[in-house]
Image (cartoon, rainbow, N blue to C red):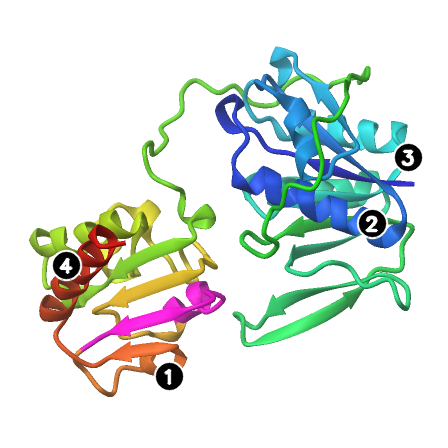
Amino acid sequence: MSVLVLAENPKGTFKKPAFEAVHYGHLTAKALGADCIALVLGAVDNPAQLGEYGASKVIHLGDNNFDSYDSKRYLAAVTQVAKQTGSNVVVLNHSSTGKSLSGGLAVTLDAGVVSGVNSIPSTDNGFSVKKNVFSGKAVAEVSIISDNKVLSLMGNSIPPKQVGSAAPVETLQVELPQASTTVTGQNTVAGVVPLPEAELVVSAGRGMKGPENWGIIEDLANVLGATTACSRPVADTGWRPHHEHVGQTGVAIRPNLYIAAGISGAIQHLAGVNSSKTIVVINKDPEAPFFKAADYGVCADLFDVVPALTEAIKNFKASN
């Protein structure tokens, strides 16, 4: 019995989500009295480093069949490796890759699947995991009674911790189907932490009055080392790119700190951000619904507060 973790490696590099998934797999394996095995598909510099986050060994299938994502090939590889290693629990990130694989793995492995888990499985009475439901308004505890299980881990749920050292790296033989897609090019945002991975996020809405004022938001984000985001109306009007849109119809995030300036806090927006650990709201409307969800609220003009906050943080950093 073992726990198999698919460690994603976009552009041949491990990022925080891979370490989160492996450490989660390690903690799950520990609860089950099993081993944690990491699976890496495609070229990567140092697969052995996953041992530092709890993998007892790493299976690396590094050929060019995995240079670009193809759901058929990834599904076939994960399924065959799970069967060859005797893994009855498969852990994925709750990413676009994990979402596209989880249903197929449930079929090929005859497994129960729970998407978006945010806690270590409980094994006191069977096998159960917790996840947020109803747009984060409640927590469901889901029992999986099948022998095989597939879990996708919500980002920023389990902090990755270094608990070991470099792991041995092995390879296995798998049979892959013909590719179903051909990737002719990719357009990706470079130089910023993607929103699902960000621990600090500074967001703004229509209260900014226009795209020409966005500099104060970027200044605050830069001094904090944060990623910028926006509400849907801002993205729809073209003030900001759509990849910054957070909310029910955009990107769902759960950073350690979410600062919202000039956002009223409609339910659709709250659904994508209310799992944030700390929410700070800046709005001059005392009736803004976002204040009800905020940990800290500043009822004042954002054009006064945001620059002042930026300067205060700069001064604090300069003196510490």
Task: From the top left corner, tell me how far across and down residue 2 is, in percent.
Answer: 86, 40
Q: Which residue is mark 3?
A: 86
Q: Earlier in the sequence, mark 1 or mark 3?
A: 3
Distance in Å between CA atoms under marks 1 and 3: 48 Å
Which labelled disc corresponds to residue 292? 1
Q: Are marks 1 and 2 in contact (CB under 8 Å)?
A: no
Q: Secondary structure at mark 4?
A: helix
Q: Quadrant of the C terminus?
A: bottom left
Does residue 253 belong to the magenta stretch? Answer: no
Distance in Å between CA atoms under marks 2 and 3: 16 Å
Which labelled disc corresponds to residue 30? 2
User: What residue occupies the far front of the structure in this picture?
Assistant: 319
Q: Which of the 4 quarters of the picture holds residue 258?
A: bottom left
Distance in Å between CA atoms under marks 4 and 2: 46 Å
Q: Earlier in the sequence, mark 4 or mark 2?
A: 2
| Residue positioned 26% across, 82% down in the render | 288
Q: Are marks 4 and 2 in contact (CB under 8 Å)?
A: no
Task: From the top left corner, tell me how far across and down residue 235 is, in percent.
Answer: 25, 53
Q: Earlier in the sequence, mark 4 or mark 1?
A: 1
Q: Is residue 112 left or right of residue 270?
A: right
Q: Which of the 4 quarters of the picture holds residue 74?
A: top right
Q: Is residue 168 left or right of residue 236?
A: right
Q: Earlier in the sequence, mark 4 or mark 3?
A: 3
Q: Nearer the viewer, mark 4 or mark 2?
A: 4
Q: Is residue 241 left or right of residue 135?
A: left
Is 312 located above or below residue 100 in the figure? below
Q: Which residue is mark 4?
A: 311
Q: Which residues, given as a range, are shown in magenta?
A: 268-283
Q: Nearer the viewer, mark 1 or mark 2?
A: 2
